[in-house]
Image (cartoon, rainbow, N blue to C red):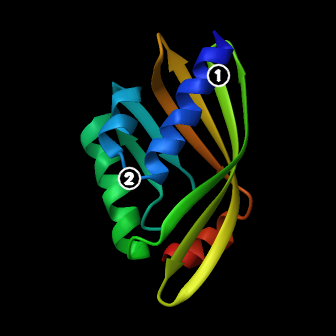
Amino acid sequence: MGDLNSVIVRKAYEDFAVGNIPSVFAVFDAGITWHVPGHSPLSGDYTGHDQVGGFFQRTMELSGGAFSIDVHNVLAEDDLVVALVTVNAERNGLSASFPEIHVWQMKNGKATGFREYQGDEQREDRFWS
């Protein structure tokens, strides 16, 4: 099951990279929970497609659309998928890259939970605030 889940999550990142957001949301369970740590305008807990969609929209607004994710490794076991990534963004004329770990909880081929772990939470908070 882990191998299939890693393929599903990896494809969601690929779809996100090319702007195919409907395909990304097709992987998300309707009641998905989404957690972003810290104290920035993007930090918080989001539930369901509407709130996660709002988070995506806010991310693109704050970055002027200059936002991408480089996926380095995707590791999976059973219903848990871990992605080692670098988030790249621009804001107010500044470019930044942040190492992150994304942890996905899967059930029946759908993402039911997402939790972001930031390499430098204070730096990300300053960048997005």
Classify the position of the N terminus by image quarter.
Answer: top right
- The percent coordinates of residue 68 (x first, y second) are 53, 61
Is 79 on the left or on the right of 32, as rendered?
right
Q: Nearer the viewer, residue 122 or 68?
A: 68
Residue at (42, 67) in percent of width and height: 41
Mark 1 Cα within 10 Å, few/some/many (few <14, many 20+)?
some
Residue extending furthest bottom? 93
Residue at (64, 22) in percent of width and height: 80
Question: Helix, strand, or loop for circle 2?
Answer: loop
- The percent coordinates of residue 32 (x first, y second) are 39, 30
Q: Are marks 2 and 1 in contact (CB under 8 Å)?
A: no
Report the residue marked by disc 2. Answer: 19
Report the residue marked by disc 1. Answer: 80
The image quadrant that residue 22 belongs to is top left
Residue at (47, 10) in percent of width and height: 108
Residue extending furthest left? 50
Is 29 on the left or on the right of 6, as rendered?
left
Query: How much space separates mark 2 and mark 1, taking CA atoms?
Result: 25 Å
